Image: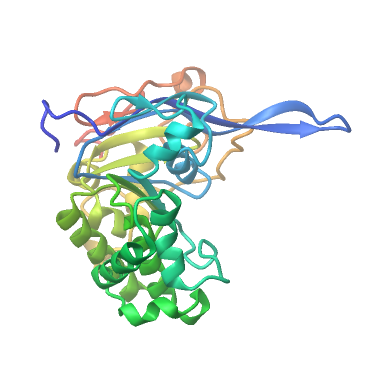
Amino acid sequence: MPLDQEKPLLQVKHLKKYYPIKKGVISRTVGYVKAVDDVSFDIYPGETMGIVGESGCGKSTTGRSLVRLEDPTAGQVLFQGKDLATVSQKEMRKLRTDLQIIFQDPYSSLNPRKRIGDLLAEPLLAHKLATKAEAEKKVNEIMEIVGLPKQYKNRYPHQFSGGQRQRIGIARALMLRPKLIICDEPVSALDVSIQAQVLNLLKDLQKSLNLTYVFIAHGLGAVKYISDRITVMYLGKVMELATTREIFEHPKHPYTEILLNAYPIPNPHERNRTQMVIEGDVPSPANPPKGCVFHTRCPFAKDICREKAPGLTGKDHLVACHFPIDEGKA
């Protein structure tokens, strides 16, 4: 856990991202898809914040909003005190040297017409931080750091395997020596053995380069391995936020407990918590349920859950639930 006196590197305050639903010849707005709906958390220097949840819960949109690849509808994203939602494009361009993202699909995020060496040198040249000779030297250094032979810089993206392409994506994110990297499901498209290699690489880079990560995934195994704290999201909202150990050993939200039940372990008979089963489908973010957004699938839902949305309460272990799970109920 970060020290109490340490200042957050990034503060997210009541972040919202709504997409308008338009119909008719004149494209009249008839509603909104609430992809991210009032999300708040802090991220401290050198830590990894994991964000987990089902597909469509808003975790990737949250990550993209943190680096302003998506402009927030409302709320604040404060990076070292500067609100990224309100800074000018010119100032945002300067801040992007400290903010980078690793995409889920490494192949589609790389220009197939450019050699890898040119792709990696491009950020340095675009920001005028190096000459061509200096950029080439930097490319060689970064490729060695991520475990790729420097002679590969003359190859094109299609000549690499999926794991190698993700290493290229990591290398590109490192070129400007950023302070914060958004890892948007960086291992979900990789084989299990390759996932382990990439996760170990990310952890080693974090130690050697003093990086801070936001690690987005739906696989709890990867999140448990790399994260210091975990944010659990459902239908655009934060359900629970705590240290990785607390989330896995003492979950308080029923949704978190259900996610953990779906997490495979070598011997299922060793589970020491009550098995909980989730029912029904995820509601539409264009028409989320009134009250707690999870009440339509929650085994503990009561009348108040259908009428009033719970706030995110707690000190070190935050939970948005009227009836959080305790040790006796679990």
* Residue 224, percent from left and from top: 25, 54
Query: In the rendered image, which quarter contains the C terminus?
Result: top left
The residue depicted at 34 percent of the width and 56 percent of the height is: 130
Q: Quadrant of residue 154?
A: bottom left
* Residue 303, percent from left and from top: 47, 20
Q: Nearer the viewer, residue 34 or 289?
A: 34
The number of discs equals: 0
Is 284 rendered above or below residue 141? above
Is 137 rendered above or below residue 97? below
* Residue 323, percent from left and from top: 33, 26
Q: Quadrant of residue 185?
A: bottom left
Q: Is residue 16 left or right of residue 253?
A: right
Q: Is residue 111 left or right of residue 264?
A: right
Q: Nearer the viewer, residue 326 or 32?
A: 32
* Residue 120, percent from left and from top: 40, 64
Query: In the rendered image, which quarter contains the N terminus?
Result: top left
Q: Nearer the viewer, residue 187 or 303?
A: 187
Is 175 rendered above or below residue 38? below
User: Is residue 27 among what the camera can see?
Assistant: yes
The residue depicted at 42 percent of the width and 46 percent of the height is: 53
The residue depicted at 48 percent of the width and 31 percent of the height is: 295
The residue depicted at 34 percent of the width and 42 percent of the height is: 256
* Model colouring: rainbow
